[in-house]
């Protein structure tokens, strides 16, 4: 049986690797960009879905790192702005 200390150490290693700036930016990119149509359909949304789950899992360390990466925040802001425009235009028309 795996001890609690080993589980905690494993979790900390996973969080440490996920919070590297390059990884965080890749998670945001996977979440905010439409996947290529060249990819087989059953795999097309697999990684974007996993990336979205990781970014929204409400782990404070991940949230703090994401908030500290300007490029990632800018990408999220642009996506949110575009979504708000679409919703507004649908509401008005």
Image (tube, helix red, strand yellow):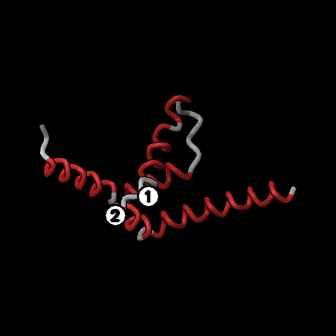
From the viewer's perspective, is 75 left or right of 24? Answer: right
Q: Which of marks 1 and 2 is in front?
A: 2
Q: Where is residue 68 in the image (x, y as percent from the top left)?
A: 41, 70
Q: Tell me where residue 75 sits by quadrant.
A: bottom right
Q: Residue at x 13, y 41 (%)?
A: 2
What kind of element bears circle 1?
helix
Quick one: quadrant of the C terminus?
bottom right
What kind of element bears circle 2?
helix
Q: Where is residue 16 in the image (x, y as percent from the top left)?
A: 27, 58
Quick one: quadrant of the N terminus?
top left
User: Residue 92 versus residue 76: which sits nearer the camera?
Assistant: 92
Q: Is 61 placed above or below 9 here?
A: below
From the viewer's perspective, is 63 left or right of 2? Answer: right
Q: Where is residue 38 in the image (x, y as percent from the top left)?
A: 56, 33
- Within 10 angstroms of label 1, few (less than 14), some, or many (20 or more) residues? some
- Within 10 angstroms of label 2, few (less than 14), some, or many (20 or more) residues? few
From the viewer's perspective, is 77 left or right of 48? Answer: right
Q: Is 75 placed above or below 36 here?
A: below
- Residue at the disc numbered 2: 61
Q: Are marks 1 and 2 in contact (CB under 8 Å)?
A: no
- First of labels 1, 2 by sequence position: 1
Q: Position of residue 37 (x, y in %)?
A: 59, 35
User: Residue 30 versus residue 59: which sits nearer the camera?
Assistant: 59
Q: Which residue is drawn at 43% across and 58% down?
A: 25
Q: Which mark is residue 6?
A: none
The alpha-carbon separation of the residues under discs 1 and 2 comes to: 15 Å
Q: Is 38 placed above or below 54 here?
A: above
- Residue at the disc numbered 1: 25
Q: Which residue is drawn at 73% across and 61% down?
A: 85
């Amino acid at each position: 049986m795996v001890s609690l200390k080993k589980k905690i150490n494993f979790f900390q290693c996973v969080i440490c690797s996920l919070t590297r700036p390059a990884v965080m930016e890749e998670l945001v990119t996977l979440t905010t960009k439409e996947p290529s149509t060249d990819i087989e359909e059953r795999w097309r949304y697999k990684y974007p879905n996993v990336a979205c789950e990781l970014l929204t899992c409400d782990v404070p360390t991940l949230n703090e790192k994401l908030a500290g990466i300007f490029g990632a925040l800018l990408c999220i802001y642009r996506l949110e702005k575009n979504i708000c425009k679409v919703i507004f235009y649908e509401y008005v028309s």
